[in-house]
Structure formats: C-alpha cells, structure tokens
Amino acid sequence: MKILVIDDDPFILKVLTRQLTLASSKEIIACSSAEQALNLLEQDGGAIGLVILDLQMPQMDGIECVRHLAHLGYQGRVLLLSGEDERILSTAQSLARAHGLNVLDAVKKPISFERLCQVLAQGQAAPLLPKGSHGGLCDPADLARGIASGELINHYQPKVVLANGAVDGVEALVRWQHPRQGIIYPDQFISVAEQHGMIEELSRCVMRQALSDARFWRQHGLSLNIAINVTMNNISSLLFPEFVTQMAMETGMPLDHLVLEVTESQLMAEPLKALDSVARLRLKRIGLSIDDFGTGYSSLAQLRDFPFNELKIDRSFVHQASRDPTRKAIFDSTLAMAEQLGMSTVAEGVEDAEDWDYLQKLGRCHLAQGYFIARPMPAEKIVDWLQQWHHRLEGLIAPRKK
C-alpha cells in the first residue's frame, strides 16, 4: 500500500516525503494540489493506504478535498495536517469522520518525525472500520424479518474502574447477523427501527439476550453489571418498568446490577410518560445512565428533569483530551458538574495508553470504556478476556503504587 501526501508548499512536501521514507517502507507519492491527488485516487485509489492532507491550500482546500474523498468512497486512512488553530483541526477531523473516513489523527504543523512515526504505528495497529459500518441504511422489511427470525445478537464491551482496573460490568451492543451480508452494525439499522416502529421490539430482544448472557456469566462465577441501551421514546411505555422487572426476575438478575443507558437520537414524543417511567425504574434501584453526554439531544435539560445516577462522557471529549485544550476543558467541566450532582462518571473512547494514563493521573472519573481496554466481543469470550485483563493490569496499575 502506498502513502499519498498532499501539500501545496514544496518545502513541506519535500520534508514530509523524506520523513516518510525514513519511517516507512511504503512507496511515497507527493502531490502539490488536491485536484492532482483526487485524479490519482480516481485511477488507483485502492493502492493508496494512507492520505496525508494539508488543510490550507489554494484552489481546493483540505475541507473540500475531504468531501471529495468521501464521494470517491476512499477506504484507506487519513491524516490531517494544518498550521491553523487547533479548533479548526478538531472541526475538520469531526467532519471527515462524519463523512465516514478513517481518520487517524489531526496534527498541527510542522509534525515532528517522532510524532509521525507514532501516527504511522497507530495506523498499523488499528484495523479499518468494519466493512459496511458507514454504508447505506438497511431495508425496513428486511430488518423486520431479521428481528422476527432472531438474527440480532449482542456483543459486549467491558467497563473498568479507573482507580484499580477492576471490571465493573459490560455494555450490550447489538449486531445484526444477516444471513447474506454478515455482521451489520447498528448505525445502519437503529434509525430505521425508530422510524418504522420497530425500536421497542428490537430493544426487548437486546435485553432478553443480555439478561440471559448475564445468567450464563453468573453460573461461571462472574457477577457483572449489565448496561443496555434504550431511548427515551423506547421507555415512554408505561408498561416498560414492569417488562424490565419481569425479565430480570426470570433470569435471576439483581435489579441494582442493571443499568439502562439512555440515548436520545430523536426528540421525545411523550416526555411526560418517559418521566413517569424513569422515575419508577429508579425506585426499583435500576441504574439510569445518560449516554453520549454533550452530543445530540443528551443535554443539561435531561439532567435537570430525569433522575440519572450515571453520566457517560462522549468519546469525542475523552480521546486525546490530554493534548487538546478544548476537549480537556469540556471533559473537566463535565466531571466537575457530575461531582456536584453526585453522579458517577464513565469515560467513553479510551483508545490508547495516553488516554488511560491521563485518566489515571486525573483521578476524578470512575469508570473507563474503550478499545484500549477491550473491543466489543461475544458473550462466550468475556471469561477469557478477564484473565488476559488481569495480566495486563500488572503493567497498568502496579507501577503507580510505587
């Protein structure tokens, strides 16, 4: 696979090419304009594994180039560079990811040789996003058939206590095991389920399987908290608390080990019923977590009106917070607010050792979740992962006790 460098400054282009030649065995292609690079990608895009793109260029700037990369369906990785303000870099990174591009990082120019090597190593270690994860939405009739046929499966991502690395529990993440297309990820079918009146049955399928898997783990001596994603509209049914209670009783799941992570991808249709339902769930000692806080409709108004006892800080404010002043400021202020409200906190998007070390040293966040700890996995792999995690902890926690 080749590396394509796009920068209008001849000196910077020469320096980057030299650095990349020393850091990588891959063929380096240098382009002085986005137009030239896009023509090359149209002809031989499959051979380009990494595009390094300067944002500030004449004629076609990097932002416009990002849009064209997405239009071409570019599947490789992207590294954004710019001498502009870091907030512009952050915005460009968010935009590129929203377009479905595999963005490794957004780095302020000039990039050092050490930082470049670090990014390249990160690109080799991190697999590309799952095939189809940014594809088109699924067919509603096919989804209805899949739900009825029992094709939905759960994978589970662990959450650990930052203070000592102990495993607190897992979050259930639904997948669709399609008979022809293989694994389909939720970004392709959750919104379809919401729009076509299938979200309630879908969520109930996820819950049934999660509580059944929790019973399997308890039989193997593991008592884990189970977090299950629901929406406010999902729990607007006044019968929802009874359904949850009944399912927990049938599987022997202690109610205080169950956490409902509330995500809000649409405005609530019936806020009064949702308020009724969540209040009764908390009376039953079922945990309520506000998910992806700071994005979408997850807002201060929800914290004011609903009895959440846990706050999950979105990965966009966690990953790289140690070296991004804007993310750090938002992350710190969210932690301070949660502390004042007496809520526990979960940091999502702990992707690498830098994120983990930052949270450890900060010492204010309760739980961590992300690829650095574990990727989502089938239920039967949790036991083996636990043993591996205990071995890893010797290097992650023990040195800090000295």
Image (spheres, rainbow, N blue to C red):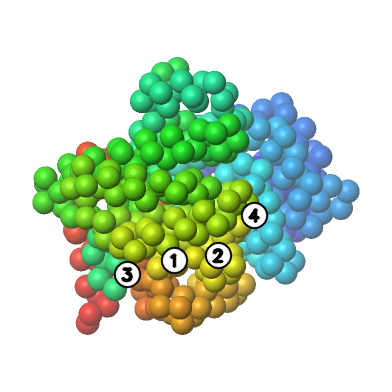
Q: Is residue 5 visible to us here? A: yes
Query: On the rendered structure, is 36 left or right of 318?
Result: right
Do the residues under discs 1 and 2 have CB atoms within 8 angstroms? Answer: yes
Where is mark 3, residue-wise? Answer: 162
Could you tell me the amino acid type at mark 3?
Answer: Leu
| Number of the label disc, if any, that sits on residue 94 | 4
Distance between the Cα atoms at labels 3 and 1? 21 Å
**Chain-order first, disc 3 or disc 4:** 4
Q: Secondary structure at mark 4?
A: helix
Nearest the eye: 1 or 263: 263
Instruction: Answer left or right for 38 relative to 392.
Output: right
Residue 23's disc is: none
Q: Residue furthest top?
A: 180
The label number, if any, that marks residue 308 in the structure image:
1
- Identify the residue position indicated by label 2 in the image: 302
Instruction: Pinpoint residue 353: horizontal percent, then vertical percent.
Output: 39, 63
Name which quarter of the figure residue 271 lies in.
bottom right
User: Which element type, helix, strand or loop, lies under badge 2?
Assistant: helix
Quadrant where the image shows the C terminus: bottom left
Q: Nearer the viewer, residue 245 or 102?
A: 245
CA gap, disc 3 and disc 4 = 27 Å
Instruction: Residue at 71% x, 26% y: name it.
Output: 43
Residue ID at (30%, 63%): 285
Query: The disc labelled 4 sits on which kind of residue?
Result: Ser
Give the left or right position of residue 268, taking residue 64 as reference: left
Sequence-wise, which precedes: disc 1 or disc 4?
A: 4
